[in-house]
Amino acid sequence: MGPWARDQKSSLPSCKSRVLTKECYVQNTARQYAQIYAAEAQPLEGFGEVPEIIPIFLIHRPANNIPYATVEEELIGEFVKYSIRDGKEINFLRRESEAGQKCCTFQHWVYQKTSGCLLVTDMQGVGMKLTDVGIATLAKGYKGFKGNCSMTFIDQFEALHQCNKYCKMLGLRSLQNISQRQKEPRVSKNKTRPNSTTVKMAPGPPTAGRKTSRPL
Ligand SMILES: [Zn+2]
């Protein structure tokens, strides 16, 4: 089998296949963002190695009692949670490691690229190889993608993230200024999507011919 671990989730009943599908969908989406991040960060002088989110696959094995399983590379070494769900529990020693700092910078980079609509959470893994990450999006999602984590993680991130040298190398804007502007609506930049809820009827008599039903 080499470095491949199988059946990691085989204790789950098959009805959880939807959960596994979502898990793969989230991790592979986060992987895409990490690849774009790597392409931008790697050429910067002194940035060095960039964290990679490893791919994960959903497989179906019809002959097995538990037909759905996920397959991904087995990470060998000390498993570290660089960020965990409750931002208050951030371990400062971990955050000060190179991989930890680059994970925080990646979170900030994604946050800024998506205008604060999407955040990769649960940064964890071995060294620069990460797995089992989550994504939080605003309620309406981002470009058709909805995450699997509460959007409160985005608020926590805005409040708790402190820029490090890698954020500065990438020229990311400090979140401290952003959190002061937090009361402003964040959706205003999204011009491509027609938003019918913002259409307001002009005050005046109701349009002739249109029947409005009374509430029961
Ligand atoms: Zn930052």
Image (tube, rainbow, N blue to C red):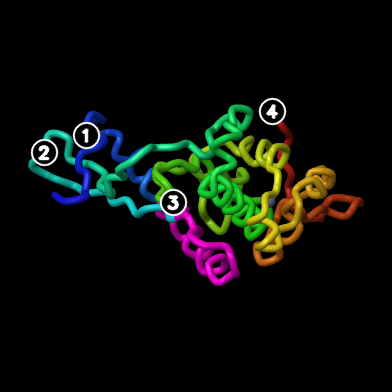
In this rendering, the label closer to the viewer, 3 or 1: 3
| 3D distance between C-alphas at marks 2 and 3 | 34 Å
> Neighbour class for label 2 at 10 Å: few (<14), some, many (≥20)?
few
| 3D distance between C-alphas at marks 3 and 4 | 60 Å
**Above or below 151: residue 107:** below
Amino acid on which disc 3 is placed: Met
Q: Earlier in the sequence, mark 4 or mark 2?
A: 2
Question: Tag 2's secondary structure?
Answer: loop
Labels 4 and 2 touching (C-beta < 8 A): no
| 3D distance between C-alphas at marks 3 and 1 | 26 Å
Amino acid on which disc 2 is placed: Asn
**Above or below 79: residue 30:** below
Q: Residue furthest left?
A: 63
| 3D distance between C-alphas at marks 4 and 1 | 51 Å
> Neighbour class for label 1 at 10 Å: few (<14), some, many (≥20)?
some
Residue occupying image coordinates x 47% and y 54%: 51
> Neighbour class for label 4 at 10 Å: few (<14), some, many (≥20)?
few
37 part of magenta stretch: yes
In this rendering, the label closer to the viewer, 4 or 2: 2
Question: Tag 4's secondary structure?
Answer: loop
